[in-house]
Amino acid sequence: GDSVTQMEGPVTLSEEAFLTINCTYTATGYPSLFWYVQYPGEGLQLLLKATKADDKGSNKGFEATYRKETTSFHLEKGSVQVSDSAVYFCALSSNSGYALNFGKGTSLLVTP
Amino acid sequence: DSGVTQTPKHLITATGQRVTLRCSPRSGDLSVYWYQQSLDQGLQFLIQYYNGEERAKGNILERFSAQQFPDLHSELNLSSLELGDSALYFCASSGSGGIGYEQFFGPGTRLTVL
């Protein structure tokens, strides 16, 4: 079945450091891929998405490129801020179902 | 603010009881999804409704049921509650029930079963 694997957290970075959170997937057909962010005590917010191979999603300085050859959708940001501290979820939506299939989440803590 | 509302925000109840969680989707969205978030299972899809009809089922227990009403709001009913049902329950909505459309999440209902 479909699945998403994310790097284990927590990830701790200093402000202005470069961020990469790895995400790989297994799915039938051509899934759509998403990154959601969950701030403490809040619901999930869509951060970015990509619907086909080689698409790059971007938002608020975050980027991720849909790589079909490596079945990956890694999240990157060039310079993180304290306000980026949150849990990040990679997710997919595929031909085998309408629901989102989430990874386990990666907790990010950015220190001043 | 995603435009999806959920009530109540917190719910504390005892084992064996029954509770109802309510969700109002974004204006114009026809599809509603329910997810459960727990520390050990992560985010798990429970069930989807589209314009009043059940469209997809995930890891939903038989003790749980849901429905979507003509005004498109949805309710998730949890009965014979067990300690393990303690979790965050999220509702999400999307304009279409199809694949590739982003889902907008509500703030969640935190259920504690004592």
Image (cartoon, helix red, strand yellow):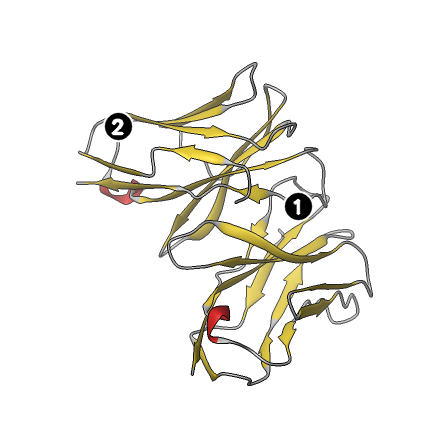
Please give the residue where the numbered disc 1 appears in the rendered image: B102
Image quarter hosting the C terminus of chain B: top left
Write down the quadrant of residue B108 in the picture. top left
Rendered position, B13 above or below A73 = above
| First in residue order: circle 1 vs circle 2 | 2
Rendered position, A97 above or below A66 = above
Give the foreground label among 1 and 2.
1
Task: Please name the residue shown 77% across and 68% down the image.
Answer: A67
Rendered position, A100 above or below B33 = below
Task: Please name the residue shown 65% across and 40% down the image.
Answer: A97
Rendered position, B111 above or below A71 = above
Residue A93, image x and y in percent?
A: 67, 48
| Left or right of A58 on screen, residue B48 | left
**Which chain does tag 2 point to?**
B
- The type of residue carrying mark 2 is Ser
The crowding category of the residue bearing disc 2, from other C-alpha atoms within 10 Å (few below 14, some 14 to 19, many at least 20), is: few
**Which chain does tag 1 point to?**
B
> What element does badge 1 sit on?
loop
Q: Which mark is residue B80?
A: 2
Residue B61, image x and y in percent?
A: 40, 33
Task: Please name the residue shown 26% across and 32% down the image.
Answer: B81
> What element does badge 2 sit on?
loop
Dots 1 and 2 on the same chain: yes
| Left or right of B78 on screen, residue A85 | right
Q: Which mark is residue A63?
A: none
Write down the quadrant of residue A64 in the picture. bottom right
Write down the quadrant of residue B78 in the picture. top left
> Distance from label 1 to label 2 (Cα)?
33 Å
